[in-house]
Amino acid sequence: MRISSSWLTLGASLSLLIPAWTANAQEFNLPLRPFTKVVLEPDTTVNTSNSTANISRLATSEEVTPQSVIIDEAQSESANKSTSSSTSNSTSSSTSTQKASPDPAMPQVAIATLAKVNNQDPPKLLSTTNTNIVQDSQRSQPQKVSSSTEPARIDPNSTVYESGKLDPAQTLVVPTTPSQVKLDLSKPVTLAELLELVERSSPDWIQAKIAVDRARAGLRAAEAGRSPTVSASSRYTYGNSVFSPPTVTNSTTNSTTNTSTTHALTGTLGISYNIFDSGVNDNTIAAAENSLRIAEASLNQVNQTIRLNIVTAYYSLQNADETIRIQRKAVENAERSLKDTKSRERAGVGTKFDVLQSEVSLANAKQDLLNAEASQLVARRELSRQINYPPTIEITAADKIAPVAAWKMSLEESILLAVRNRSELDIRKLEREVARNNANATLSRLGPQVSVFTNFDASTSFVNNGSASADYQVGLSLSWTLFDGGKAAAQVDQYKADQATAESKFEQAARQARYDVESAYINQRSRFQQIDTATKAVQQAEEALRLARLRLDAGVGTQLEVISAESDLTRADVNRVQAIIGYNQSRANLERAINGI
Protein backbone atom coordinates (compact mmCIF):
# COMPACT_ATOMS: atom_id res chain seq x y z
CA MET A 1 0.00 0.00 0.00
CA ARG A 2 2.90 2.36 0.73
CA ILE A 3 4.44 1.72 -2.70
CA SER A 4 1.17 2.47 -4.48
CA SER A 5 0.85 5.83 -2.69
CA SER A 6 4.38 6.82 -3.75
CA TRP A 7 3.63 6.08 -7.39
CA LEU A 8 0.42 8.10 -7.18
CA THR A 9 2.35 11.04 -5.70
CA LEU A 10 4.98 10.85 -8.45
CA GLY A 11 2.31 10.79 -11.15
CA ALA A 12 0.57 13.83 -9.71
CA SER A 13 3.88 15.75 -9.58
CA LEU A 14 4.66 14.97 -13.21
CA SER A 15 1.19 16.09 -14.29
CA LEU A 16 1.91 19.48 -12.71
CA LEU A 17 5.45 19.85 -14.07
CA ILE A 18 4.80 18.92 -17.71
CA PRO A 19 2.56 21.96 -18.46
CA ALA A 20 5.19 24.21 -16.87
CA TRP A 21 7.89 22.75 -19.14
CA THR A 22 5.79 23.17 -22.28
CA ALA A 23 4.93 26.77 -21.37
CA ASN A 24 8.58 27.79 -21.35
CA ALA A 25 8.46 29.30 -24.86
CA GLN A 26 8.29 33.01 -24.29
CA GLU A 27 9.85 35.80 -26.34
CA PHE A 28 10.54 39.44 -25.73
CA ASN A 29 12.02 41.88 -28.24
CA LEU A 30 11.90 45.65 -28.08
CA PRO A 31 10.41 47.23 -31.20
CA LEU A 32 12.55 50.09 -32.39
CA ARG A 33 11.92 52.96 -34.71
CA PRO A 34 13.87 53.14 -37.98
CA PHE A 35 17.28 54.68 -37.53
CA THR A 36 18.84 57.11 -39.96
CA LYS A 37 22.35 56.57 -41.21
CA VAL A 38 25.09 57.96 -39.00
CA VAL A 39 27.23 60.74 -40.49
CA LEU A 40 30.41 61.64 -38.64
CA GLU A 41 31.86 65.07 -39.09
CA PRO A 42 35.55 65.03 -40.08
CA ASP A 43 38.06 66.42 -37.66
CA THR A 44 39.13 69.81 -38.98
CA THR A 45 42.04 70.02 -36.56
CA VAL A 46 44.07 67.53 -38.59
CA ASN A 47 45.65 68.67 -41.81
CA THR A 48 44.72 66.04 -44.35
CA SER A 49 44.92 67.98 -47.61
CA ASN A 50 47.95 66.11 -48.84
CA SER A 51 46.61 62.72 -47.85
CA THR A 52 43.23 63.47 -49.43
CA ALA A 53 44.87 64.46 -52.68
CA ASN A 54 46.98 61.32 -52.66
CA ILE A 55 43.92 59.19 -51.93
CA SER A 56 42.08 60.72 -54.89
CA ARG A 57 45.10 60.17 -57.08
CA LEU A 58 45.37 56.57 -55.96
CA ALA A 59 41.66 56.03 -56.49
CA THR A 60 42.02 56.91 -60.17
CA SER A 61 45.19 54.94 -60.70
CA GLU A 62 45.27 51.52 -62.22
CA GLU A 63 44.32 48.72 -59.86
CA VAL A 64 47.13 46.37 -58.94
CA THR A 65 46.15 42.76 -58.53
CA PRO A 66 48.36 40.03 -57.12
CA GLN A 67 49.35 36.97 -59.02
CA SER A 68 46.41 34.65 -59.30
CA VAL A 69 46.68 31.38 -57.49
CA ILE A 70 44.56 28.40 -58.44
CA ILE A 71 43.47 26.09 -55.67
CA ASP A 72 41.83 22.79 -56.42
CA GLU A 73 38.24 22.62 -55.38
CA ALA A 74 37.29 19.95 -52.92
CA GLN A 75 34.84 17.44 -54.30
CA SER A 76 33.58 16.62 -50.85
CA GLU A 77 30.34 15.04 -49.87
CA SER A 78 29.43 18.05 -47.76
CA ALA A 79 29.88 20.36 -50.75
CA ASN A 80 27.63 18.13 -52.86
CA LYS A 81 25.00 18.19 -50.16
CA SER A 82 25.24 21.95 -49.93
CA THR A 83 24.88 22.34 -53.70
CA SER A 84 21.87 20.06 -53.92
CA SER A 85 20.20 21.70 -50.94
CA SER A 86 20.77 25.21 -52.25
CA THR A 87 19.41 24.18 -55.68
CA SER A 88 16.20 22.82 -54.20
CA ASN A 89 15.88 25.84 -51.97
CA SER A 90 16.29 28.34 -54.80
CA THR A 91 13.19 27.01 -56.57
CA SER A 92 10.97 27.91 -53.63
CA SER A 93 12.66 31.15 -52.62
CA SER A 94 10.58 34.28 -53.08
CA THR A 95 12.34 36.91 -50.98
CA SER A 96 15.52 38.80 -51.85
CA THR A 97 17.25 41.73 -50.28
CA GLN A 98 17.87 45.00 -52.02
CA LYS A 99 21.23 46.60 -51.57
CA ALA A 100 21.29 49.84 -49.69
CA SER A 101 22.36 52.73 -51.80
CA PRO A 102 25.37 54.59 -50.43
CA ASP A 103 24.71 57.81 -48.61
CA PRO A 104 26.23 60.74 -50.52
CA ALA A 105 26.85 62.52 -47.23
CA MET A 106 29.11 59.77 -45.98
CA PRO A 107 32.84 60.15 -46.63
CA GLN A 108 33.96 57.61 -49.19
CA VAL A 109 37.36 55.97 -48.98
CA ALA A 110 39.05 54.86 -52.17
CA ILE A 111 40.10 51.33 -51.23
CA ALA A 112 39.54 47.96 -52.80
CA THR A 113 36.76 45.93 -51.34
CA LEU A 114 37.14 42.51 -49.77
CA ALA A 115 34.76 40.74 -52.08
CA LYS A 116 33.38 41.54 -55.51
CA VAL A 117 29.65 41.94 -55.61
CA ASN A 118 27.60 41.49 -58.74
CA ASN A 119 25.07 44.32 -58.74
CA GLN A 120 22.96 42.58 -61.33
CA ASP A 121 22.33 39.60 -59.08
CA PRO A 122 21.25 40.74 -55.60
CA PRO A 123 21.96 38.19 -52.91
CA LYS A 124 19.08 35.87 -52.15
CA LEU A 125 18.02 35.35 -48.60
CA LEU A 126 16.04 32.58 -47.07
CA SER A 127 13.10 30.88 -48.73
CA THR A 128 9.52 31.48 -47.74
CA THR A 129 9.56 28.29 -45.70
CA ASN A 130 12.27 29.77 -43.51
CA THR A 131 12.73 33.02 -41.63
CA ASN A 132 12.21 36.09 -43.82
CA ILE A 133 13.72 39.42 -42.90
CA VAL A 134 11.06 42.11 -43.01
CA GLN A 135 12.16 45.14 -44.99
CA ASP A 136 9.06 47.28 -44.60
CA SER A 137 9.75 49.60 -41.66
CA GLN A 138 6.50 51.53 -41.92
CA ARG A 139 4.14 49.05 -40.33
CA SER A 140 2.06 49.99 -37.34
CA GLN A 141 2.64 46.74 -35.44
CA PRO A 142 5.70 44.52 -34.95
CA GLN A 143 5.88 42.01 -37.79
CA LYS A 144 6.47 38.44 -36.67
CA VAL A 145 8.65 36.34 -38.93
CA SER A 146 8.76 32.61 -38.41
CA SER A 147 8.98 29.24 -40.07
CA SER A 148 7.63 25.80 -39.42
CA THR A 149 10.73 24.78 -37.49
CA GLU A 150 11.83 28.06 -35.90
CA PRO A 151 10.30 30.05 -33.03
CA ALA A 152 8.64 33.33 -33.97
CA ARG A 153 10.90 36.37 -33.86
CA ILE A 154 10.21 40.08 -33.96
CA ASP A 155 12.00 42.22 -36.49
CA PRO A 156 12.81 45.50 -34.67
CA ASN A 157 12.94 47.48 -37.92
CA SER A 158 9.29 46.77 -38.68
CA THR A 159 7.82 48.87 -35.87
CA VAL A 160 6.96 52.56 -35.97
CA TYR A 161 8.34 54.33 -32.93
CA GLU A 162 5.77 56.21 -30.83
CA SER A 163 7.31 58.85 -28.58
CA GLY A 164 6.16 59.03 -24.99
CA LYS A 165 4.31 55.71 -25.05
CA LEU A 166 5.37 52.41 -23.53
CA ASP A 167 5.38 49.65 -26.10
CA PRO A 168 3.39 46.51 -25.30
CA ALA A 169 5.32 43.64 -23.78
CA GLN A 170 6.15 40.87 -26.20
CA THR A 171 6.89 37.25 -25.55
CA LEU A 172 10.26 35.57 -25.09
CA VAL A 173 10.67 32.43 -27.19
CA VAL A 174 13.24 29.68 -26.86
CA PRO A 175 13.26 26.40 -28.81
CA THR A 176 11.17 23.68 -27.19
CA THR A 177 11.30 20.86 -29.76
CA PRO A 178 14.24 19.15 -31.49
CA SER A 179 12.90 20.17 -34.91
CA GLN A 180 13.45 23.83 -34.00
CA VAL A 181 17.21 23.38 -33.56
CA LYS A 182 17.91 20.60 -36.04
CA LEU A 183 20.02 21.58 -39.05
CA ASP A 184 17.92 20.51 -42.03
CA LEU A 185 19.21 22.84 -44.75
CA SER A 186 22.59 24.00 -46.05
CA LYS A 187 22.88 27.36 -47.76
CA PRO A 188 26.03 28.60 -49.52
CA VAL A 189 26.46 32.33 -48.98
CA THR A 190 29.02 34.86 -50.11
CA LEU A 191 30.86 37.31 -47.91
CA ALA A 192 29.05 40.26 -49.49
CA GLU A 193 25.67 38.73 -48.61
CA LEU A 194 26.66 38.26 -44.97
CA LEU A 195 27.92 41.84 -44.66
CA GLU A 196 24.57 43.13 -45.87
CA LEU A 197 22.82 41.32 -42.99
CA VAL A 198 24.78 43.15 -40.27
CA GLU A 199 22.29 45.98 -39.76
CA ARG A 200 19.30 43.65 -39.75
CA SER A 201 20.32 40.65 -37.69
CA SER A 202 23.36 41.38 -35.53
CA PRO A 203 22.39 41.65 -31.84
CA ASP A 204 25.35 43.93 -31.07
CA TRP A 205 24.33 46.37 -33.81
CA ILE A 206 20.72 46.41 -32.61
CA GLN A 207 21.85 47.12 -29.03
CA ALA A 208 24.04 50.00 -30.21
CA LYS A 209 21.07 51.32 -32.17
CA ILE A 210 18.95 51.23 -28.99
CA ALA A 211 21.64 53.29 -27.26
CA VAL A 212 21.35 55.93 -30.00
CA ASP A 213 17.59 56.10 -29.54
CA ARG A 214 18.08 56.48 -25.80
CA ALA A 215 20.55 59.33 -26.29
CA ARG A 216 18.13 61.01 -28.68
CA ALA A 217 15.40 60.82 -26.04
CA GLY A 218 17.81 62.37 -23.52
CA LEU A 219 18.36 65.28 -25.90
CA ARG A 220 14.63 65.86 -26.16
CA ALA A 221 14.38 65.84 -22.36
CA ALA A 222 17.15 68.44 -22.11
CA GLU A 223 15.52 70.66 -24.73
CA ALA A 224 12.26 70.56 -22.75
CA GLY A 225 13.94 72.75 -20.11
CA ARG A 226 13.52 75.76 -22.41
CA SER A 227 9.74 75.43 -22.47
CA PRO A 228 7.34 76.93 -19.93
CA THR A 229 5.86 74.72 -17.25
CA VAL A 230 2.09 74.53 -16.89
CA SER A 231 0.56 72.91 -13.82
CA ALA A 232 -2.97 72.54 -12.55
CA SER A 233 -4.39 71.35 -9.26
CA SER A 234 -7.79 71.11 -7.62
CA ARG A 235 -9.01 70.29 -4.13
CA TYR A 236 -12.34 69.50 -2.58
CA THR A 237 -12.82 69.95 1.17
CA TYR A 238 -15.67 68.95 3.43
CA GLY A 239 -15.97 70.33 6.92
CA ASN A 240 -18.38 69.82 9.79
CA SER A 241 -18.07 71.92 12.97
CA VAL A 242 -20.15 71.77 16.13
CA PHE A 243 -20.41 74.60 18.68
CA SER A 244 -22.79 75.37 21.53
CA PRO A 245 -23.09 79.00 22.69
CA PRO A 246 -24.27 79.34 26.33
CA THR A 247 -27.58 81.05 27.14
CA VAL A 248 -28.62 82.39 30.63
CA THR A 249 -32.29 82.39 31.65
CA ASN A 250 -33.48 83.27 35.25
CA SER A 251 -30.17 82.35 36.88
CA THR A 252 -30.13 79.13 34.92
CA THR A 253 -27.54 78.42 32.20
CA ASN A 254 -28.75 76.44 29.21
CA SER A 255 -26.74 75.32 26.19
CA THR A 256 -27.82 74.62 22.63
CA THR A 257 -25.84 72.75 20.04
CA ASN A 258 -25.34 74.24 16.52
CA THR A 259 -23.79 72.42 13.53
CA SER A 260 -22.00 74.10 10.58
CA THR A 261 -21.20 72.18 7.38
CA THR A 262 -18.92 73.45 4.56
CA HIS A 263 -18.35 72.15 1.03
CA ALA A 264 -15.55 73.92 -0.86
CA LEU A 265 -13.96 73.25 -4.26
CA THR A 266 -10.79 75.12 -5.19
CA GLY A 267 -8.67 75.00 -8.33
CA THR A 268 -5.31 76.49 -9.29
CA LEU A 269 -3.72 76.93 -12.73
CA GLY A 270 -0.09 78.01 -12.74
CA ILE A 271 2.37 78.88 -15.51
CA SER A 272 6.08 79.46 -14.90
CA TYR A 273 8.86 80.25 -17.34
CA ASN A 274 12.57 80.53 -16.64
CA ILE A 275 13.76 83.61 -18.48
CA PHE A 276 17.34 83.52 -17.19
CA ASP A 277 19.21 80.57 -15.69
CA SER A 278 22.87 81.65 -16.04
CA GLY A 279 23.38 79.06 -18.83
CA VAL A 280 22.15 75.90 -17.10
CA ASN A 281 19.84 74.82 -19.93
CA ASP A 282 22.33 75.68 -22.67
CA ASN A 283 25.08 73.58 -21.10
CA THR A 284 22.69 70.73 -20.35
CA ILE A 285 21.50 70.66 -23.96
CA ALA A 286 25.10 70.81 -25.23
CA ALA A 287 26.00 67.82 -23.04
CA ALA A 288 22.99 65.89 -24.36
CA GLU A 289 23.93 66.69 -27.97
CA ASN A 290 27.47 65.48 -27.44
CA SER A 291 26.13 62.34 -25.74
CA LEU A 292 24.04 61.66 -28.83
CA ARG A 293 27.12 62.08 -31.03
CA ILE A 294 28.98 59.64 -28.78
CA ALA A 295 26.20 57.10 -29.23
CA GLU A 296 26.29 57.55 -33.00
CA ALA A 297 30.08 57.19 -33.09
CA SER A 298 29.79 54.09 -30.91
CA LEU A 299 27.27 52.66 -33.37
CA ASN A 300 29.75 53.22 -36.19
CA GLN A 301 32.49 51.58 -34.12
CA VAL A 302 30.30 48.58 -33.34
CA ASN A 303 29.40 48.28 -37.01
CA GLN A 304 33.07 48.20 -38.00
CA THR A 305 33.87 45.63 -35.33
CA ILE A 306 30.99 43.38 -36.33
CA ARG A 307 31.95 43.50 -40.00
CA LEU A 308 35.54 42.60 -39.14
CA ASN A 309 34.36 39.69 -36.99
CA ILE A 310 32.16 38.40 -39.80
CA VAL A 311 35.01 38.68 -42.30
CA THR A 312 37.33 36.86 -39.90
CA ALA A 313 34.78 34.10 -39.29
CA TYR A 314 34.18 33.71 -43.03
CA TYR A 315 37.90 33.40 -43.73
CA SER A 316 38.16 30.86 -40.92
CA LEU A 317 35.41 28.84 -42.59
CA GLN A 318 37.23 29.02 -45.92
CA ASN A 319 40.41 27.87 -44.22
CA ALA A 320 38.56 24.93 -42.65
CA ASP A 321 37.10 23.95 -46.03
CA GLU A 322 40.49 23.98 -47.70
CA THR A 323 42.06 22.09 -44.81
CA ILE A 324 39.54 19.30 -45.35
CA ARG A 325 40.44 19.20 -49.04
CA ILE A 326 44.13 18.99 -48.22
CA GLN A 327 43.67 16.31 -45.57
CA ARG A 328 41.48 14.22 -47.88
CA LYS A 329 44.17 14.44 -50.51
CA ALA A 330 46.70 13.33 -47.89
CA VAL A 331 44.47 10.36 -47.00
CA GLU A 332 44.27 9.42 -50.68
CA ASN A 333 48.06 9.57 -51.01
CA ALA A 334 48.51 7.48 -47.87
CA GLU A 335 46.01 4.87 -49.12
CA ARG A 336 47.81 4.69 -52.45
CA SER A 337 51.17 4.23 -50.72
CA LEU A 338 49.73 1.51 -48.48
CA LYS A 339 48.29 -0.29 -51.49
CA ASP A 340 51.61 -0.15 -53.33
CA THR A 341 53.50 -1.32 -50.26
CA LYS A 342 51.24 -4.33 -49.79
CA SER A 343 51.65 -5.20 -53.47
CA ARG A 344 55.42 -5.12 -53.13
CA GLU A 345 55.23 -7.24 -50.00
CA ARG A 346 53.18 -9.88 -51.81
CA ALA A 347 55.70 -9.78 -54.68
CA GLY A 348 58.56 -10.38 -52.24
CA VAL A 349 60.30 -7.04 -52.79
CA GLY A 350 58.83 -5.30 -49.74
CA THR A 351 58.89 -5.83 -46.01
CA LYS A 352 56.35 -5.90 -43.23
CA PHE A 353 58.05 -2.87 -41.72
CA ASP A 354 57.22 -0.81 -44.82
CA VAL A 355 53.58 -1.88 -44.56
CA LEU A 356 53.44 -0.86 -40.91
CA GLN A 357 54.91 2.54 -41.73
CA SER A 358 52.28 3.09 -44.43
CA GLU A 359 49.48 2.04 -42.10
CA VAL A 360 50.66 4.48 -39.41
CA SER A 361 50.89 7.26 -41.96
CA LEU A 362 47.33 6.51 -43.13
CA ALA A 363 46.01 6.51 -39.55
CA ASN A 364 47.63 9.87 -38.86
CA ALA A 365 46.16 11.33 -42.04
CA LYS A 366 42.68 10.11 -41.08
CA GLN A 367 43.09 11.62 -37.62
CA ASP A 368 43.97 14.99 -39.14
CA LEU A 369 40.95 14.72 -41.44
CA LEU A 370 38.59 14.13 -38.52
CA ASN A 371 39.99 17.16 -36.71
CA ALA A 372 39.55 19.27 -39.84
CA GLU A 373 35.92 18.18 -40.24
CA ALA A 374 35.19 19.10 -36.62
CA SER A 375 36.83 22.50 -37.11
CA GLN A 376 34.67 23.09 -40.18
CA LEU A 377 31.44 22.43 -38.28
CA VAL A 378 32.52 24.74 -35.46
CA ALA A 379 33.45 27.49 -37.94
CA ARG A 380 30.02 27.24 -39.58
CA ARG A 381 28.18 27.55 -36.27
CA GLU A 382 30.38 30.46 -35.17
CA LEU A 383 29.55 32.37 -38.35
CA SER A 384 25.84 31.66 -37.88
CA ARG A 385 26.01 32.87 -34.29
CA GLN A 386 27.60 36.19 -35.15
CA ILE A 387 24.94 37.18 -37.70
CA ASN A 388 22.04 35.58 -35.80
CA TYR A 389 21.23 33.26 -38.70
CA PRO A 390 18.21 30.93 -38.40
CA PRO A 391 19.19 27.93 -36.24
CA THR A 392 17.93 25.36 -38.75
CA ILE A 393 20.15 26.53 -41.63
CA GLU A 394 23.79 25.63 -41.94
CA ILE A 395 26.00 28.18 -43.68
CA THR A 396 28.62 27.13 -46.21
CA ALA A 397 31.17 29.35 -47.92
CA ALA A 398 30.30 30.09 -51.53
CA ASP A 399 33.34 32.25 -52.34
CA LYS A 400 36.48 30.59 -53.62
CA ILE A 401 39.74 31.27 -51.87
CA ALA A 402 41.63 33.93 -53.80
CA PRO A 403 43.74 36.92 -52.72
CA VAL A 404 41.95 40.25 -52.76
CA ALA A 405 43.29 43.31 -54.57
CA ALA A 406 46.54 44.83 -53.36
CA TRP A 407 46.56 47.82 -51.02
CA LYS A 408 47.18 51.05 -52.92
CA MET A 409 48.07 53.55 -50.20
CA SER A 410 51.41 54.02 -48.57
CA LEU A 411 51.93 53.44 -44.86
CA GLU A 412 52.01 57.16 -44.07
CA GLU A 413 48.79 57.87 -45.96
CA SER A 414 47.10 54.97 -44.21
CA ILE A 415 48.09 56.30 -40.78
CA LEU A 416 46.76 59.78 -41.55
CA LEU A 417 43.52 58.33 -42.82
CA ALA A 418 43.16 56.21 -39.67
CA VAL A 419 43.61 59.09 -37.21
CA ARG A 420 41.08 61.11 -39.19
CA ASN A 421 38.38 58.45 -39.51
CA ARG A 422 38.63 56.37 -36.35
CA SER A 423 35.44 56.53 -34.30
CA GLU A 424 37.41 55.91 -31.10
CA LEU A 425 39.11 59.30 -31.42
CA ASP A 426 35.80 61.07 -32.02
CA ILE A 427 34.33 59.40 -28.95
CA ARG A 428 37.19 60.56 -26.71
CA LYS A 429 36.94 64.15 -27.94
CA LEU A 430 33.19 64.18 -27.36
CA GLU A 431 33.60 62.70 -23.89
CA ARG A 432 35.89 65.60 -23.02
CA GLU A 433 33.28 68.07 -24.25
CA VAL A 434 30.56 66.36 -22.21
CA ALA A 435 32.68 66.70 -19.08
CA ARG A 436 33.22 70.41 -19.77
CA ASN A 437 29.52 70.95 -20.43
CA ASN A 438 28.55 69.26 -17.18
CA ALA A 439 31.06 71.35 -15.25
CA ASN A 440 29.73 74.58 -16.76
CA ALA A 441 26.15 73.54 -15.98
CA THR A 442 27.12 72.91 -12.35
CA LEU A 443 28.73 76.32 -12.03
CA SER A 444 25.74 77.96 -13.72
CA ARG A 445 23.44 76.66 -11.01
CA LEU A 446 25.28 78.92 -8.54
CA GLY A 447 24.29 81.99 -10.55
CA PRO A 448 21.03 83.91 -10.42
CA GLN A 449 17.87 82.17 -11.63
CA VAL A 450 15.08 84.46 -12.82
CA SER A 451 11.63 83.23 -13.74
CA VAL A 452 8.18 84.69 -14.24
CA PHE A 453 4.99 83.06 -13.07
CA THR A 454 1.27 83.55 -13.11
CA ASN A 455 -1.36 81.75 -11.05
CA PHE A 456 -5.13 81.70 -11.43
CA ASP A 457 -7.16 80.54 -8.43
CA ALA A 458 -10.87 79.78 -8.34
CA SER A 459 -13.02 78.52 -5.49
CA THR A 460 -16.66 77.82 -4.95
CA SER A 461 -18.81 76.79 -2.01
CA PHE A 462 -21.87 74.57 -2.20
CA VAL A 463 -23.49 76.35 0.74
CA ASN A 464 -24.61 79.95 1.14
CA ASN A 465 -26.22 79.95 -2.27
CA GLY A 466 -23.13 78.55 -3.96
CA SER A 467 -20.85 81.57 -3.70
CA ALA A 468 -17.75 81.61 -5.95
CA SER A 469 -14.57 83.64 -6.09
CA ALA A 470 -11.59 83.97 -8.44
CA ASP A 471 -8.26 85.75 -8.35
CA TYR A 472 -4.95 85.69 -10.19
CA GLN A 473 -1.34 86.57 -9.47
CA VAL A 474 1.54 87.59 -11.72
CA GLY A 475 5.05 87.83 -10.38
CA LEU A 476 8.78 87.61 -10.89
CA SER A 477 10.97 85.16 -8.97
CA LEU A 478 14.68 85.55 -8.30
CA SER A 479 16.85 82.92 -6.61
CA TRP A 480 20.60 82.90 -6.03
CA THR A 481 22.66 80.26 -4.28
CA LEU A 482 25.14 82.09 -2.10
CA PHE A 483 26.69 79.10 -0.35
CA ASP A 484 26.28 75.35 -0.96
CA GLY A 485 28.96 73.97 1.33
CA GLY A 486 31.42 73.32 -1.54
CA LYS A 487 29.16 70.84 -3.36
CA ALA A 488 29.47 72.56 -6.75
CA ALA A 489 33.24 72.83 -6.47
CA ALA A 490 33.51 69.11 -5.69
CA GLN A 491 31.35 68.21 -8.69
CA VAL A 492 33.49 70.42 -10.94
CA ASP A 493 36.59 68.58 -9.73
CA GLN A 494 34.92 65.31 -10.71
CA TYR A 495 34.23 66.60 -14.20
CA LYS A 496 37.81 67.86 -14.48
CA ALA A 497 38.96 64.32 -13.73
CA ASP A 498 36.62 63.02 -16.44
CA GLN A 499 38.11 65.53 -18.88
CA ALA A 500 41.66 64.47 -18.06
CA THR A 501 40.69 60.80 -18.46
CA ALA A 502 39.16 61.47 -21.88
CA GLU A 503 42.29 63.31 -23.02
CA SER A 504 44.51 60.46 -21.86
CA LYS A 505 42.31 57.91 -23.63
CA PHE A 506 42.43 60.05 -26.78
CA GLU A 507 46.22 59.87 -26.87
CA GLN A 508 46.07 56.13 -26.19
CA ALA A 509 43.53 55.60 -28.99
CA ALA A 510 45.68 57.63 -31.41
CA ARG A 511 48.70 55.46 -30.67
CA GLN A 512 46.59 52.32 -30.96
CA ALA A 513 45.26 53.47 -34.34
CA ARG A 514 48.79 53.92 -35.65
CA TYR A 515 49.85 50.53 -34.31
CA ASP A 516 46.84 48.82 -35.89
CA VAL A 517 47.69 50.33 -39.27
CA GLU A 518 51.38 49.49 -39.04
CA SER A 519 50.88 45.89 -37.91
CA ALA A 520 48.20 45.18 -40.50
CA TYR A 521 50.22 46.88 -43.25
CA ILE A 522 53.37 44.88 -42.45
CA ASN A 523 51.47 41.59 -42.20
CA GLN A 524 49.57 42.02 -45.46
CA ARG A 525 52.76 42.88 -47.30
CA SER A 526 54.55 39.85 -45.84
CA ARG A 527 51.63 37.52 -46.58
CA PHE A 528 51.43 38.81 -50.12
CA GLN A 529 55.05 37.84 -50.70
CA GLN A 530 54.48 34.43 -49.11
CA ILE A 531 51.80 33.53 -51.66
CA ASP A 532 54.27 33.16 -54.52
CA THR A 533 56.76 31.29 -52.33
CA ALA A 534 54.14 28.86 -51.06
CA THR A 535 52.80 28.23 -54.57
CA LYS A 536 56.27 27.31 -55.82
CA ALA A 537 56.78 25.08 -52.78
CA VAL A 538 53.60 23.13 -53.62
CA GLN A 539 54.79 22.54 -57.17
CA GLN A 540 58.19 21.39 -55.94
CA ALA A 541 56.62 19.09 -53.31
CA GLU A 542 54.41 17.45 -55.95
CA GLU A 543 57.44 16.79 -58.14
CA ALA A 544 59.42 15.45 -55.16
CA LEU A 545 56.61 13.00 -54.33
CA ARG A 546 56.50 11.78 -57.92
CA LEU A 547 60.27 11.18 -57.95
CA ALA A 548 60.17 9.43 -54.56
CA ARG A 549 57.62 6.94 -55.85
CA LEU A 550 59.65 6.35 -58.99
CA ARG A 551 62.76 5.71 -56.88
CA LEU A 552 60.82 3.26 -54.72
CA ASP A 553 59.49 1.41 -57.75
CA ALA A 554 63.04 1.24 -59.19
CA GLY A 555 64.38 -0.19 -55.92
CA VAL A 556 66.73 2.68 -55.14
CA GLY A 557 64.41 4.48 -52.72
CA THR A 558 62.66 3.63 -49.48
CA GLN A 559 59.10 3.86 -48.21
CA LEU A 560 60.25 6.41 -45.66
CA GLU A 561 61.17 8.80 -48.48
CA VAL A 562 57.67 8.50 -49.94
CA ILE A 563 56.05 9.17 -46.55
CA SER A 564 58.30 12.18 -46.00
CA ALA A 565 57.48 13.54 -49.47
CA GLU A 566 53.74 13.15 -48.79
CA SER A 567 54.09 15.07 -45.51
CA ASP A 568 56.05 17.82 -47.26
CA LEU A 569 53.33 18.15 -49.89
CA THR A 570 50.60 18.41 -47.26
CA ARG A 571 52.57 21.00 -45.31
CA ALA A 572 53.30 23.06 -48.43
CA ASP A 573 49.64 23.02 -49.46
CA VAL A 574 48.60 24.14 -45.98
CA ASN A 575 51.17 26.94 -46.08
CA ARG A 576 49.79 28.18 -49.38
CA VAL A 577 46.23 28.31 -48.08
CA GLN A 578 47.31 30.02 -44.87
CA ALA A 579 49.29 32.58 -46.87
CA ILE A 580 46.22 33.53 -48.92
CA ILE A 581 43.87 33.54 -45.92
CA GLY A 582 46.43 35.45 -43.88
CA TYR A 583 46.80 38.07 -46.61
CA ASN A 584 43.06 38.54 -46.90
CA GLN A 585 42.71 38.75 -43.11
CA SER A 586 45.53 41.31 -42.85
CA ARG A 587 43.87 43.32 -45.59
CA ALA A 588 40.60 43.28 -43.62
CA ASN A 589 42.44 44.34 -40.46
CA LEU A 590 43.99 47.22 -42.39
CA GLU A 591 40.60 48.39 -43.63
CA ARG A 592 39.25 48.19 -40.08
CA ALA A 593 42.22 50.20 -38.83
CA ILE A 594 41.21 53.12 -41.07
CA ASN A 595 37.52 52.66 -40.21
CA GLY A 596 36.65 51.71 -43.78
CA ILE A 597 35.74 48.03 -43.80
Image (tube, helix red, strand yellow):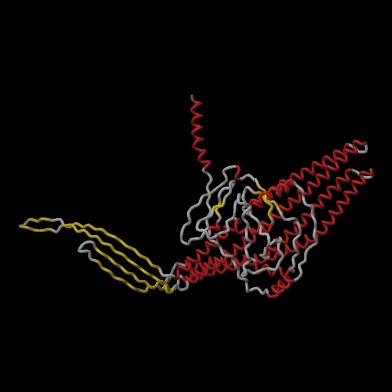
In depth, the one of 224 and 129 nearer the eye is: 129
* Horizontal relation, residue 168 to residue 501: left or right: left
In depth, the one of 535 and 291 nearer the eye is: 535
Which residue does the image show at 73% across and 73% down from the upper left?
Answer: 57
Indicate whether 533 appears above or below 289.
above
In depth, the one of 71 and 247 nearer the eye is: 71
Q: Can you give x and y, in whole percent of width and height, for residue 95 in the image?
A: 61, 55
Q: Can you give x and y, in whole percent of width and height, for residue 476 in the image?
A: 37, 74
Q: Can you give x and y, in whole percent of width and height, for residue 212 in the image?
A: 55, 62
Location of residue 313 by image quarter = bottom right
* Horizontal relation, residue 15 to residue 579: left or right: left
Q: Can you give x and y, in whole percent of width and height, for residue 492 in the image?
A: 51, 68
Which residue does the image show at 60% across and 42% down from the upper left?
Answer: 178
Q: Is residue 168 visible?
A: yes
Which residue does the image show at 80% across and 56% down from the upper left?
Answer: 70
Count of labels shown?
0
Location of residue 269 by image quarter = bottom left
